[in-house]
Amino acid sequence: MSEHISASVADGVGHVTLNRPKALNALSYDMVVALTEVFDAWRDDSEVAVVVLDGAGDRGFCAGGDIRELHGYATAGHTEEARTFFRTEYRLNAAIARYPKPVVAIMDGITMGGGVGLAGHASVRVVTERSRVAMPETRIGFTPDVGGTWLLAKAPGELGSHLALNSRTMDAADAIHAGFADALVPSESLPHLLQALAERADPGSPAEIVMLFDETPGPSALAASRAWVDACYSAPTVAEVVERLRARTEPDAAAAADELETLSPTALAVTHDAVRRARTLPRLEDALEQEFQLVSWFIEQPDLHEGIRAQVIDKDRSPTWNPAALADVEPGILDRVLAAQVYGRVWPG
């Protein structure tokens, strides 16, 4: 068991907590392995009827994968170790989605990247007034993974494309509207929710118990953006998305265009097409396989190294992308990477 994971069983509830609060519970490989062991052990444990997944501290459930660990793999040339991390993580994401017992995930505070991979596929997904949910991969020259493209592809209209390309952060209302969460429970009510799950009485299901504490969120700013988002992000290329954004009169559209022009052109082009392709895939596992091919390719690309350097290592927030312009990105780059199939698979066979 990783020192950064705690797990206990009482009153029929298996309670597993990410316990790395100083790092916003960022996921290391050891943590992913430990979580996998916990979920495997509880699958057929008659003492566990429901699983609660949360994070220690009041700042975040999980800020994502450990970017410094990934950077270490990439810069040292340990790409196979990085791919082992991704395979193990993606199998855990799918296992949570297919788990035979209810999994209640509590996304209190920051929940991004790998945190969405854990909580976003759970059977009951709780957000609070402190929740900040995002797939922020394009900010580091990367692309959404951990089944993120599956969730993004199912968001209303083109909201998923906007969330992915701009790495837009959602509050509780936005996350529920976009399909990343199911219920808003005030943070002060979380201890009472945990108590109610432990004291649950038949026939109340975990989902029904959560709804006893659910509050109606305020208006979603993301939903209010729908008209200009759908009009612009339905464009067939990122360059045309930017053109359409520039032609709008909404200040938020202009700001979105400005933001896109600061991000990795390669990451944007791949992400744009990956979300669209995910809409055609039949299962979460298919989206994870697609993502695995893409992230396996990205860890060998200069933009990921540069993005992590600029955002996490040096923190100068001034990445130099290669290529620097959308016009210079190879046309059909996603299809070329996926067609190569040189990185193995998450599920062999």
Image: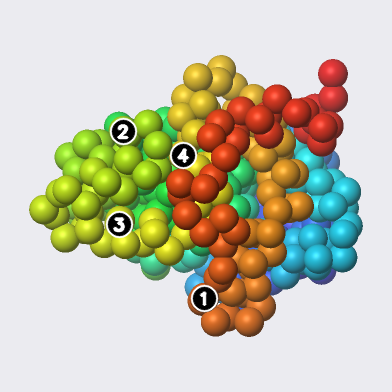
Amino acid on which disc 3 is placed: Ala
- Quick one: label 4 or label 3, which is nearer the N terminus? 3
- Kindly identify the amino acid type of the residue bearing the numbered disc 1: Ser
Amino acid type indicated by mark 4: His
Disc number placed over residue 272 in the picture, else none: 4
Tag in front: 2 or 1:
1
The amino acid type, in three-letter code, at marker 2 is Ser
Q: Which of the image's four quarters has the N terminus?
A: bottom right
- Identify the secondary structure beneath mark 4: helix
Q: Read off the residue under disc 3.
A: 256
Q: Residue furthest front?
A: 328
> Marks 2 and 3, Cα distance to the nearest angstrom?
14 Å
Coordinates of residue 319 in the picture (x, y in percent): 55, 70
On the rendered structure, is 127 left or right of 278? left
Instruction: Tell which circle, 1 or 4, labels the residue nearer the N-terminal end.
Output: 4
Identity of the residue drawn at 55% across and 82% down: 316
CA distance for labels 2 and 4: 10 Å
The tag earlier along the polypeptide, 2 or 3, is 2
Q: Quadrant of residue 208?
A: top left
Going from N to C along the chain, the mark reached first, 2 or 4, is 2
Residue holding disc 1:
318
Label 3 vs 1, first from the N-terminus: 3
Question: Residue at position x 82%, y 41% from top?
Answer: 41
Provide the residue designation for mark 2.
234
Measured as percent of width and height from the top left, residue 37 is found at 83, 46
**Residue 32: where, in percent of width, then height?**
77, 52
